[in-house]
Image (tube, rainbow, N blue to C red):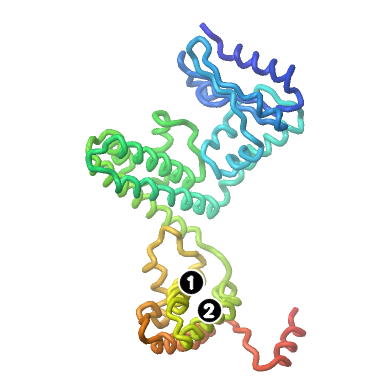
Amino acid sequence: MLNVFDVAQSLVTHIQERYSEDVALIAYYGSYAQGTATPRSDLDFFFIPASERGSEASVQFVLHDISFDFWPISWERAERMAKFEEQNTTIIADCEILYVRSEEDRARFLQLRKTIAELPEQAQTFIAKAESQLREVYVHLYKMSLLQEDDISGCRTEAHGVLNKLVYTLALLNRTYMTRGWGKNREQLLNFPLRPARLEEQIETILRASSCREIRKTCEQLTVDTVAIVMEQRKTHASGPSYPDRAKGFYEEVKGIFDKIRTACEKNDYTTASYWSIGVQDEVAAFLCYFETGLWPGSLEAGATYHSFYHEAGLPDLPALLDPLNLVPLHEAVVRLDQLLELYLQSKGVAINRFNDLAQFEQFLNERV
């Protein structure tokens, strides 16, 4: 019976003899590192090249009908894994080292593990990573919506993508990483404190259903449930300075866009006026949400949610006034918006830097601490 560690030693010896200055570290991970290997298990290797030549040591082979993949991970990629910017953080966190070129290389690698241990203290960082990952789910849902109703193979392929990214999202929300692959990760997944209530049932349906419609519907619902957790966590961990601190300088900057729209209206330039009107209302709404809550609107959040802050402030609805034949109402609304926004921010304690002449501005500069 083949001893996979004999194969590992042959590779290490080969590296020491041929690539002693070109490979920084060799390690293995997966079932052998976790003590769950079976007779058919392969030994999952990786190595970190120290030079361009070191990458050439990569080799894939089958020995005694067992597959081996001796593959390179750059220091840069290892750092991304350690920062939870890529899946498979477990490769760095849970591997067993077979060889290091120097103590400096060992120290650098152990620093990556320290990053993995310390980063979960930054809750907002993980929520942002989860939200970013969750956005990618919608690509698979969109592709699924384009499939024929009887394309079960295509449907299952896209559902696989949905599940893969949702599981990673849930791991990030729980500020951890998946330690094992599909088929072995269920216990960890179902023990997450933050997870959809029907997660186990939904996964079973997605994996076992034979109806494309049922698979798609379940994928969509699981996505909605996960989005709800992300949104709730964003609210839970919202923090920051006071309203005046958050809003400092905002009016002075956005006023330039108001003036751009006014000029476009006066020139009867509907294209410019419409583009900036829609954009500036969305921007003001997003900022008002942030000023009030300390939380930026999420990319997965419906516009109506954060636009409520805009409408509650009594500000005019610019897109509703767009009329290519008559820009006068839009012009009047922008003038009104300019005035109302300044007054509204001042009512919240926001100081506006407005000067009547250059001398007043120069005095302001001289008095700044």
Q: According to the image, label 2 marks what residue?
A: 257
Does 332 sit left or right of 150 as displayed? right
Q: Which residue is mark 1?
A: 283
Element assignment for label 2? helix
Q: Residue sitting at 53 percent across and 55 percent down?
A: 124
Of residues 158 and 97, the one nearer the viewer is 158
Disc with the residue nearer the chain's start (1 vs 2): 2
**Can residue 40 be spotted in the picture?**
yes
Residue drawn where x is 66% and y is 31% of the image: 48
Contact, mark 1 vs mark 2 (Cβ under 8 Å): yes
For the point 50% across and 69% down, the residue is 290
Q: Residues within 10 Å of mark 1 (few under 14, many from 20)?
A: some
Image quarter (top left, top right, bottom left or bottom right) of the C terminus = bottom right
| Spatial separation of the CA atoms under disc 1 and disc 2 | 11 Å
Q: Nearer the viewer, mark 1 or mark 2?
A: 2
Residue 46: percent from the left, percent from the top? Answer: 60, 27
On the rendered structure, is 142 left or right of 233? left
Give above or below for 76 relative to 353.
above
Please say if 155 is above or below 47. Answer: below
The total number of labels drawn is: 2
> Which residue is at the far top?
1
Amino acid at dot 2: Ile
Res 347 seen here: no
SS at circle 1: helix
Q: Position of residue 131 (x, y in %)?
A: 46, 52
Image height of 7 relative to 48, above or below: above
